[in-house]
Amino acid sequence: MAEKTKITLEYLINSSPRILYPYLLEPNELAQWFADDVVYHDGIYEFVWDDETNRARLAISKENKLVRFKWIDDEPNFFEMEIVQHELTNDVSLAITDYCKEENVEDRKKIWDNSISYLQSVIGA
């Protein structure tokens, strides 16, 4: 399998970690901004985009801080969303780590940009 390129992005989110966290973890909240639909069953999240389903397992979750999903059909790749609260300003950002093929990096960044703006409007940030 071809090596994938790691993408790291950070977005300022005008929200508290406590309000933001469920949107990174809960299927209903994820479905509001991240995917067309999210189904959770027996420890597996099914993310649906345009009738295509991608299955992932929650690998790490730290309350109000971090979630990492590992793709089941695309090991060892994962995507991670980390809530970062800056000490001096108390600003909250969402740091994204994702992997994709080199030729898809710009498209993937645009997808994240769009998803995060949906997220901001959903939580009123």
Image: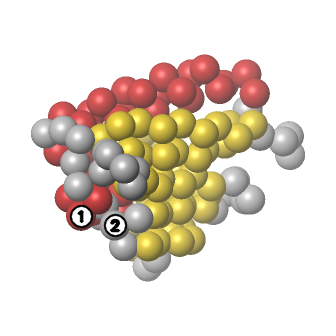
At x 45% / y 63%, what residue is drawn?
Answer: 66
At x 66% / y 25%, what residue is drawn?
Answer: 104
Q: Earlier in the sequence, mark 2 or mark 1?
A: 1
- Residue 109: which quarter of the image? top right
Where 47 sits versus 58, above or below? above
Q: Amino acid at mark 1?
A: Arg
> Label 1: which residue?
18
Drawn side of residue 69 relative to residue 88, left or right: right
The answer to whether residue 14 is seen in the rendering is: yes
* Secondary-structure class at tag 1: helix
Q: Amino acid at mark 2?
A: Asn
Drawn side of residue 5 relative to residue 12, left or right: right
> Label 2: which residue?
64
In this view of the protein, which residue sits in the foreground, 105 or 1? 105
In this view of the protein, which residue sits in the foreground, 95 or 2? 95
The number of numbered discs placed on residues in the rendered structure image is 2
The answer to whether residue 44 is seen in the rendering is: no
At x 54% / y 54%, what residue is drawn?
Answer: 80
At x 41% / y 36%, what residue is drawn?
Answer: 11
Quarter of the image containing the C terminus? top left
